[in-house]
Image (cartoon, rainbow, N blue to C red):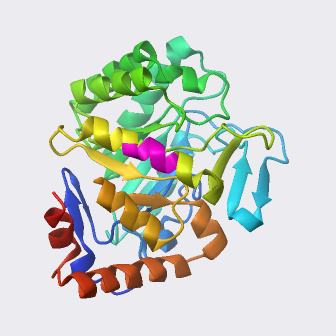
């Protein structure tokens, strides 16, 4: 049974309505095998994947390293998953009670060339859009060779254009997940294309490669400041775009991190590494933080408080 939700914690922007603004990021439930359980824990949303059209084993093991003193992880997974058809069966068989919105995180196969990548994403969109509440285009993982090259203007344009052909038949909220290291011009190009193709927003950010800890993407508190700066840049660049949603991810482990993101202008957040270390208890921490915020500010709802910041 889903934990009792507090209607005062509900947050809405654009096409998204979450009972609580804290979602689970992709990477935890790669094959959509635990949607029943996770969707009833108290998250505002659960995003599964990353899904690729065909099954793949990912990179060689070991491919995860813990930095426990920093509540951080280094991963070089490489999108291991059972493939779109098997994962689609899992989604369809889940006994979802609409406890929270479900998202699909989409990626290309390792052996798919950049020129054929748009078809991978379009195929996945067509398969999963009828089954989920929103979808995310992942071209920012550092663990699939060449993937981040698709964050170029031409690379992302070709993907967005191919998906748009499938989106006409089943329009669903669509997000782009970006890397924290993007330069200003690249970020502006991606935002321009996302707006042109009516994306709902951007998830900022994926794991970082700005470290000297070995191969892979770094997540958790070790990238807190880098991810915060990246989110701030995205928020500044999209502030004038009506109903454009920036979902915060990367280094978020305390309610103070969430509060800081809200004050910068953000709305929803996703957690992953902090959930690995702290478990479901972190959701209680966030819930108590929101309750304290409402009590000290006198706002009747989180939405009311958020709207007062505008």
- Of 92 and 78, the residue lying toward us: 78
The quarter of the displayed image where residue 33 is located: bottom right
- Compared with 102, 10 (above or below) is below
The quarter of the displayed image where residue 98 is located: bottom left
Residue 113 on the magenta span: no
The residue at 67%/25% (across/down) is: 145
The residue at 20%/51% (across/down) is: 15
In the rendered view, does 45 fall on the left or right side of 70? left
The residue at 33%/85% (across/down) is: 292
Q: Residue 138 placed where, x, y %? A: 49, 36
Q: Residue 40 placed where, x, y %? A: 43, 76
Q: In what quadrant of the picture does the C terminus appear?
A: bottom left
- Of 107 and 165, the residue lying toward us: 107
Is residue 136 shown to the viewer in this render?
Answer: yes
Is residue 22 shown to the viewer in this render?
Answer: no
Q: In what quadrant of the picture does the N terminus appear?
A: bottom left
Residue 230 on the magenta span: yes
The residue at 65%/27% (across/down) is: 110
- Of 5 and 125, the residue lying toward us: 5
Magenta-tinted stretch: 227-232
């Amino acid at each position: 049974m889903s934990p009792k939700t507090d209607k005062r914690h509900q947050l809405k922007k654009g096409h998204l309505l979450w009972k609580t603004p804290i979602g689970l990021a992709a990477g935890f439930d790669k094959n959509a095998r635990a949607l029943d359980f996770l969707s009833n824990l108290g998250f505002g949303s659960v995003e599964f994947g990353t899904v690729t059209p065909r099954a793949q084993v990912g990179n060689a093991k070991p491919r995860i390293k813990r930095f426990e003193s920093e509540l951080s992880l280094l991963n070089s997974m490489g999108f291991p998953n059972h493939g779109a058809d098997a994962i689609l069966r899992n989604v369809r068989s889940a006994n979802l009670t609409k406890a929270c919105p479900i998202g699909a995180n989409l990626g290309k196969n390792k052996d798919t060339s950049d020129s054929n990548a748009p078809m991978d994403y379009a195929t996945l969109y067509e398969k999963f859009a009828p089954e989920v509440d929103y979808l995310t285009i992942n071209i920012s993982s550092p663990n699939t060779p060449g993937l981040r090259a698709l964050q170029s203007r031409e690379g992302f344009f070709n993907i967005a254009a191919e998906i748009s052909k499938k989106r006409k038949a089943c329009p669903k909220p669509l997000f782009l997940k970006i890397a924290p290291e993007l330069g200003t011009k690249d970020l502006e190009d991606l935002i321009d294309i996302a707006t042109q193709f009516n994306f709902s927003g951007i998830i900022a950010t994926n794991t970082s490669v700005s470290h000297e800890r070995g191969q892979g993407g770094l997540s958790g508190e070790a990238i807190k400041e880098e991810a915060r700066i990246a989110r701030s840049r995205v928020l500044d660049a999209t502030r004038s775009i009506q109903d454009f949603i920036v979902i915060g991810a990367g280094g978020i482990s305390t309610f103070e991190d969430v509060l800081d993101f809200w004050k910068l202008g953000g709305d929803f957040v996703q957690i992953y590494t902090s959930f690995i270390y702290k478990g479901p208890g972190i959701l209680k921490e966030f819930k108590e933080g929101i309750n304290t915020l409402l009590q000290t500010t006198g706002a009747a709802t989180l939405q009311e408080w958020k709207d007062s910041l505008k």
